[in-house]
Each structure stands twice: as structure tokens, then as C-alpha cells.
Image (cartoon, coloured by chain):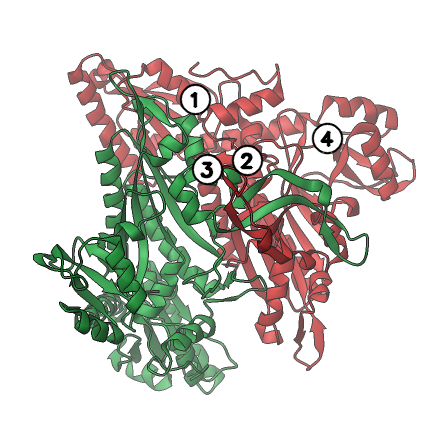
Chain colours: A red, B green
Amino acid sequence: MAKEVTGRSENYSQWYNDLVVKADLAEQSAVRGCMVIKPYGYAIWEKMQSVLDGMFKKTGVKNAYFPLFIPKSFLSREAEHVEGFAKECAVVTHHRLMTNPDGPGVVVDPTAKLEEELVVRPTSETIIWSTYKNWIHSWRDLPILCNQWCNVVRWEMRTRLFLRTAEFLWQEGHTAHATAEEAAAEAERMVGVYADFARNYMAMPVVVGHKSPGERFAGALDTLTIEAMMQDGKALQAGTSHFLGQNFAKSFDVTYTDKEGRQQYVWASSWGVSTRLMGALIMAHGDDNGLVLPPALAPIQVVMVPIYKSEEERSAVLEKMQELKKALEAGGHSVEIDDRDTLRPGFKFAEWELKGVPVRLAMGPRDLQNGTVEVHRRDTLEKVTEPLEGLDGRIVDLLDDIQKNIYKKAFDFRETQVRKVDSWDEFKEEIEKGGFLLCHWDGTAETEAKIQEETKATIRCIPVDSFVCEEEGKCVYTGKPSHRRVIFARSY
Amino acid sequence: MAKEVTGRSENYSQWYNDLVVKADLAEQSAVRGCMVIKPYGYAIWEKMQSVLDGMFKKTGVKNAYFPLFIPKSFLSREAEHVEGFAKECAVVTHHRLMTNPDGPGVVVDPTAKLEEELVVRPTSETIIWSTYKNWIHSWRDLPILCNQWCNVVRWEMRTRLFLRTAEFLWQEGHTAHATAEEAAAEAERMVGVYADFARNYMAMPVVVGHKSPGERFAGALDTLTIEAMMQDGKALQAGTSHFLGQNFAKSFDVTYTDKEGRQQYVWASSWGVSTRLMGALIMAHGDDNGLVLPPALAPIQVVMVPIYKSEEERSAVLEKMQELKKALEAGGHSVEIDDRDTLRPGFKFAEWELKGVPVRLAMGPRDLQNGTVEVHRRDTLEKVTEPLEGLDGRIVDLLDDIQKNIYKKAFDFRETQVRKVDSWDEFKEEIEKGGFLLCHWDGTAETEAKIQEETKATIRCIPVDSFVCEEEGKCVYTGKPSHRRVIFARSY
């Protein structure tokens, strides 16, 4: 191996950290809890952005941009929201530094204190609804479907690259509607977009469901989520979509005149996914050799490594590779020829495996002679020698097959990790093994809290797809009656 | 007119403000100096981003992401940089709010004071070079060509939408090279990309040149700029590219081992354009009816307005329009049919003129009968009736013609506003009329400062294209010898 990665079975958490850093995805910065997203990692994020952005726009959403800063007082307008978000955040108190009068460097200028402190946005409901007040007057102004791609900051005590960082990148959609039904439908539509993206691009078999009231977004009447399963059997919340009712409209006094001339409060949804998706992608598919990227999101889909001894051989092989590259690029595929002259092929193989490139082609003088090429697929690590003729068409099929296979592998794994549990003793035993436990729950926050306290497991969601959960039963903890199972799991 | 816009000749500054707000591009937010970029404005910015991003990547640049926050001490590492950027910036001093013990709302938690204050990035040289230190060891690691699209904050006292805001969006490229020549060439290459973009997409005839030492970026050895002329004869700096020498490498101790095994400091360039380009675009081409958008950057290139009385007429016209829309979209053009039922066509015409849509098509029942359509071009406000047959091909040509014409108009205007001035009395008179004054300058900072003090004019650049400036002469202010003319102007 080019760079040693800890084995998954040895230390899953260390394996993840190694992968992020050694595959050149991200690293810690000099600022506590803030990461640097390196070019290779950012290229994956750009692909995610581009696909999601297109999906949003197809539903009529438009992008906009709202301020980074939120006046402190805005956060306390919505009672629950302030509890959820005002606690750990970056607070700007001054607007000037000055030369240190007592030594080297610069110090905060005490005369430049802000009248009202500003908070670096942890999420933008408040600043956006204060803006929507000016945009919305009549039913003709509705719906408003805005999204922004931006950075947000939540002062986390314990951070992990991509999974939980003080600053992260995300998109946040904020929509305004005339009726509760429309806003709720929007929240559902967008969680559907996330599920589609997770399944068909990220190759992750996510479960769509409602959060329990205790796990809802601060200020929401309903939170929908997509929950993914990682290879250690833990759940990862990969995206959420909220029906906000009229809470923010009331806090910021946003009303519209309906067709009958009456003043009505506006209804809202908001929804977001973040660079956390990068963490999910890594943990869902990676193996002990490194990343395994689904072709739909791989910045490089096909890498070619030339094998040669002489300069003559080198140029003959590279010429053939250029030809193949052109053919594949014409079909919209991203291809890289690794013609670095200072590294051995074996080193390159390991490096591209580490970086999760779906298909690797190797070609040497003998291949040229025979009209063949060695084709290696990252997902199964299988290697076959194939005729060059018609290769570009077969590569396209292969990428498609890899995409499907990565999904299937994750799906099959999840199937082995989901089980119905009906007694508390069994629950305590099973939760130690990881996975999703489908259990009855009496619907109370008290029971939810006690289960978490005793086992660190939370209700990941009340599924609306993936599993048949509607059935009569008894709460796994209290034995009280229940009408459906929910998913309990430990989570990231 | 749908919404009144102040005439340019009446009050140019008010005209600009009106246009930004009434064409739905941006507005002031609840946070001092921070703007909200509205969907229509953001769609233009997205087009700019997309074109520029493609141009950057073609030169080998890759995107990455670096932290929003910079430790206070980083800013003072580079002596000039701290002077330029540490003064007016947003300073984060605390990381928590708490419920106000003495009343309603939240207050800063005094126990959550940061050990070292963080500054919201005004530009990212310092945090990026502190990162590059870990990325660069040998000559094999060079060059590094990174760009990031992000937000930055500079606490400006007087702000104007797009032109000068406390928070703005931009891209900043930061490159690291083994030699001075390579770094300087990169700075030149990127100002060339900016000039290409400004001329061929924004339709602005910019001048490329060097900044005088006094106007350089804080910490740069050379700053290249593209300077555009606005319709009031003032200059607008639309993009800059800096050769940074080894200043940041030395401040952050970034060295590499060269091929001979010697330790060398790394050479740097940085370059950026911002949402200020939006201001330039508006001011360069707009007229008293509103925006005039170059087709290459217009979010909607063709708008169609149906004319009808009966529902029958409406659906017949709309059907025809759908057909035409499909044909144009197949060619990659963006088309919108304005089928809003509650507004008169005249109102719609004015609104789309205000929003600067390059081509407007109107079609009524008589047009349907005659097989014609009314074609209106935004740049000249000309209206002609044309046969429907073969229209999509002619629209493509028309868009191309509009793009060229907008450039030509701006170019011709600039030509009327550029003049050689050789005496100080003439200078003082001519500068009042606006425009670019090509003058000899003795090369000293003192003279530059005095000219600015007396006339508010600055050296916009020492041109490397657009005008022939190499000639012997005498400084317009001191009469001392000079070898080339430079551009003096008042500016935004």
C-alpha cells in the first residue's frame, strides 16, 4: 500500500479518519473544529452539489443568498429555535483590530464594539423569514421556493472531519406557502429528492421516515429524515426536511392577503443536506484498501496507468490511452491518465484504490501487441484482461454495473443488520451488535429518553418506506400498546 | 413603466440603486452592510461562476475549501498584510449565548470567551499558506493551483449593493510555485482569464494593467488589474491578480526541497473577482428602462409574451410558443414563456425590459394567422415583425449580434472618454468631466497622493494593453521625466 490505512475490523473509527486524510479528502485546519476540504474531496462535493442543484431546480426551486450574520435578537424570536441553536455559536462582538499598544501583533479595538452582537448563522430560518416579510404581501407572491448553498457554523465540542465540524458547507432550502398542505407537501417532496439522490447517486439504501417529536428540528412541527446505515451498523442521519407550520411566520410577522382578502400567516418548510454526506459516502462503501466511490459521484471514473520500460514503449502506450480517453470523454466520462514518471505502477495502483476510482486500466507493450488491456474494478477488486476493441462501450456498461453493485452490497448488508426486537432484554443485547432494531414504542418522550439513557440508542425514524411497520404490538420498554414499529439504533 | 427607475442623467447613483432593487437583483438585509442576493440576481452570479469556473479549470486550477475563520495572530504574520486587512473586520470573541438572566432574550455567555479571537476572513492568504506548509515538501509537490468560491467580510463604513458590501461572495485563487517566473506567469495568466471573461461574456472592454505600488494588494510585489469604465465615466476595478513573491511563504515558513536538494521558499500568486462584477455589469450596460444583460450571462435569454383575448386564442398562441421554446432550448438557450394571467402585456413588456432580457417575442392571434411574431431586442429597443419560419435559427444569430453590439457600444463610449492630458490645469478641468486621462507620471508615491488629494483621481493602472502608452514625456503634476503614460480616473 502507498499509505497505510487501519483495517475496518481493527478500529472502525480510526479506519475512517485514516481514509479521510490519506485519500486527500480533508484535514484539520489551524482553527479548532474547522476543516480544510482538499481538492479531491471538494471535487466529490462539487459533483454532489451539481446533481442536487439540478434536482432542486427541476422542482421549481431557485437559488439566492442571505447574510452570514444574524442579529442576536433574531435567534430568540422563535422560542424553540433559540433553545436549539443559540447555545453554541460563533459570536461577533467587534468590528476592528488595532496594533497592540503593549507589545507585538494586533488586539481587538475596544472602541469598535457592536451595538448588537451578531451570530454566525447556524441555520438561516430567522434571517430569511425576516427577509420574506418584505417579499410576501398577497397570495400572488406565493409560493416562494429558495435555496442557498453556503457555510454555517455550530460550535461543536467534539468534532470529526465531515461528520461533525464547527464550520460546514450545506444547502438550505426555505419555502413559503399559502396553505399547510402545500408546505407539508414541499417538505415531503424534498425528502423524496434526498432519498432519490442518496439511493441513485450515493448508492446508499436510505430509509425515509419521520423523526420522533423529541428529535425534531428546533421550531418544526414535523421533521422528515433519510437515515443511512454505516458498515459498523450505526445509523447516520444524511438529510432532513422540515414542515415548520406558521412558527417562523408568526415570529417574524409574515402574513399574506388571501384571495378573499383576509390576512393569513404564511406556512413554511426548510430542508438541508451538508458536507456530512461526504462522511456517509466514505463510511457506507469504503473498504480496507480505501475509498469505494460510486461512479455517479467519482471525480475520476476511469484512471489509466501505463506500464513501460523504454521511452518508446511509454509513448506508444500513452498514445493508445489518449485515444481511449477521448472516446470515453466524448461520452461524458471523466478519465485521467496517470503518466507520472517518478512512481512505479504498483504504487499508482494502490493510490488509485485508496482514492476509490471505480475503474482502472493498465496497459503495457504486450497489451499493445495483443490488442488488450487490463481492467480492474474497484468495488470487487476483480481484474480481467479484455480486448481493446469496443472497450469504451463496455466501460460504460461496467460503470453502470459498479454503481448498481455498490448499492446492492450496501442494501444486502443493511438487510443483515435489521431485526425486529420485542423484549427489553433482547433489545439491550441486540443493540450491542449494532444495526437497526425495529421495535414498538409507546410514543412518549419519557420512554424515548429512558431507552437512550440506558442504551445510547435513539429513534432514528418512524419509517414511511423500506420496512412494513404498521402493526399492533407492545412497547419494547413499557409494554404499553403501540400501532407501529420504529427504528432504534445508535448513530453518528 | 412597471416600476419607476430614476433616469441616468438625472441622478446616476440613484439610477443604479433603483435598478438593483427594482430589477430584483439584491436588497439591503437587516444586518448592516450585508445584502440579500435575490433569485434573479443570484442566477446571473451563477452564470458568471459557471463560466469562470470552467475557465479556471481549463488552466489546471482545482477548487478546495478553507476555513471561514482566521486566528487573529495569523493576520499579523505578514507585515503589510496586517495593515491592509486587520483593521476593519468581524471579530469572533465568544462561542456561546445564554438565556438573559436579567430579562428577555439571550446574551453572550461571558464564560465562553475564546482564548484567541478569530477573524472572519477578509481574504485567505494567511490561512491558506498556513495549510500549504503541510502540503509542500519537495519540488514534486509544486505547483499547487487552488481556488475557492466563498464569502468574505470586510467591515466597510459606507456600503452600496454589490459595489461595496461588508459581506460579499467571491472566488480567490491561491497558487504556489517553485520559481518567481512561474508565479508571475500565473498572475498574468489569470488576469488574462479575467480580461477574456469581462470582454467576451460581460461585454465590457476592460483595460489590463499593473497597479501603481501604492495601489497594490497588501503583501503583493505586483498587482495586475482589469479596469472597466462605467457610463458616468468613472473607473471600476473589476478583478485583480497578484504576484506575491515569497512574502507569505516566508511568513508561514513554507519551503520546498529543489531538484538539487536545497531548501527554497515557495513563490505565490493570488487572484480574485467578486459579486462586485454584478455592479459593473449593471452600470456598464443598463439604460433608463432598466438592465441590459449580455446574452452570454442572461438567466433568461428569450422571453415570450402571449397576446390574447379569449381562452381559445390563449391556448393557440401558447401552443405555438411551446414549440418555439423547445426548439430554442434544444440549442442550449434559456427561454421563458410569461403566461401570467393577471397582468397586461404592456406591464410584462416593461418588466422584462427592466430585467434586461435580451430578446422578447410577442405573439397574438393575428400573428398566428399570418405566421409572424414580433421580435424586440433589448439593447436597441428595436421591434420588428418577422416570419415564424426559421425563427429559431435567426434568434440564435440575433443573440450573437446583441452580445457583440453591447460590447461595441461600451467600447465606443469608452473611446469618447479617453484622452491624453499633458498639463496640470487641463487635468483639473478634464477630470471633472469624467473618463480616463492618459497622463505622464513621475512614478513617485508622493505625486500620486497629491493628485488624489487635489482631484480624487487615482492611477487606475499602468496599461499593458488597450492603449499605446510607451513614450517619453513629463509628469503632468511635477514635470519630471516619464517614460509612459498611465490612466488616471475617479473610481468606484
Q: CA distance from mark 3 to mark 2?
A: 9 Å
Give percent across and percent down for residue A224. Answer: 68, 48
Q: Please provide percent x and percent y for residue A418.
A: 71, 29
Horizontal arrangement in the rendering, residue B371 relative to residue A56 (left or right) = left
Q: Secondary structure at mark 2?
A: loop
Q: Which residue is mark 3?
A: B127
In terms of sequence position, does the residue under pointer 1 or pointer 2 come before the other?
Answer: 2
Q: Which residue is mark 1?
A: A353
SS assignment at label 3: helix
N-terminal of the pair, mark 1 or mark 4, is 1
Q: Are marks 2 and 4 on the same chain?
A: yes
Q: Are marks 3 and 2 in contact (CB under 8 Å)?
A: yes
Considering depth in this image, is A171 or A326 the residue closer to the camera? A171
> What's the distance in space between the residues labelled 1 and 4, CA to CA?
30 Å
Q: Is residue A316 left or right of residue B236?
A: left
Which numbered disc covers residue A490? 4
Relative to A109, residue A41 above or below: above
